[in-house]
Image (cartoon, rainbow, N blue to C red):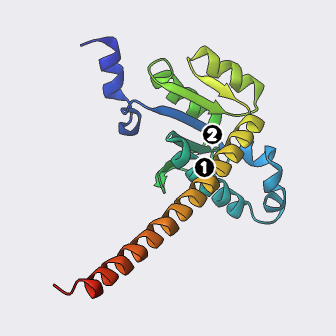
Amino acid sequence: MTLQDSVMKRIKPYYRKKRAYLFVDGYNILNSWSIFEREREEDFENARKKLMDILVDYAHYTDQAVILVFDGYKVKKNPGEEFHYKGIQVVFTKAMQTADHYIEQELTLIGRHRNVRVATSDSMEQQMILSRGGQRISARELEVEVAHAKEGLVRRKRQLKSESKVNAWEEETLESLKDLKSRLDPH
């Protein structure tokens, strides 16, 4: 058994597929993107949900495995929580564990074996990411990527809609031609 085989046996099942992974420091992004400014003030739960939905669309468009990590370290006796949400992995860290620490642990396992990026604007975290084989992406860079992905989704939806109109028209025309043929050739 090779070293890589033994490492792969210890990692979580969703890391076993050969694909690109994006870890997102949730609160870092929420505090960096201007679109969350109002939600940060009024309803932080809604801001988290909105970020989750944005990243679901992004993950589906880019075919990356997205792992969104929120700090839970300040909540006493917090056991932490991990769950799937519409195709992305969401993590609330346990008490006394920061999102940075969680991401560091995961990078130690897979950073040199998989294509892993981490979205955060925390400069100390960015240095750690590079030292563990990951690639860093700032909150602003992720915001730009998400905007491009959204534009791509809109274009794709328009394209599919116009194709379906053409297909519907073609079917309607075919039915009309069949009807005309049957009237002209009663055999």
Quadrant location, the N terminus: top left
> Toward which corner of the image does residue 7 lie, by quadrant?
top left
The residue depicted at 54 percent of the width and 27 percent of the height is: 116
Residue 128, placed above or below residue 98? above
| Label 2, residues with CA under 10 Å away: few <14, some 14-19, many ≥20 | many
Residue 156, position as x, y percentages in the image: 57, 53
Residue 120, placed above or below residue 56? above
Name the mark nearer the viewer: 1 or 2: 1
> Toward which corner of the image does residue 102 lie, by quadrant?
top right
Residue 178, position as x, y percentages in the image: 31, 78
| Label 1, residues with CA under 10 Å away: few <14, some 14-19, many ≥20 | many
Question: Distance of mark 1 from mark 2, alpha carbons?
Answer: 9 Å
Nearer-the-camera pick, 180 or 31:
180
Please say if the residues under marks 1 and 2 sit with CB atoms less than 8 Å apart.
Answer: yes
Amino acid carrying label 1: it is Leu
Quadrant location, the C terminus: bottom left
Circle nearer the N terminus (1, 2): 2
Amino acid carrying label 2: it is Val
Marker disc for residue 45: none
Query: Is residue 172 at all visible to an observer of this figure?
Result: yes
Nearer-the-camera pick, 53 or 38:
53
Find disc 1 in the rendering and name its residue: 55
Find disc 2 in the rendering and name its residue: 24
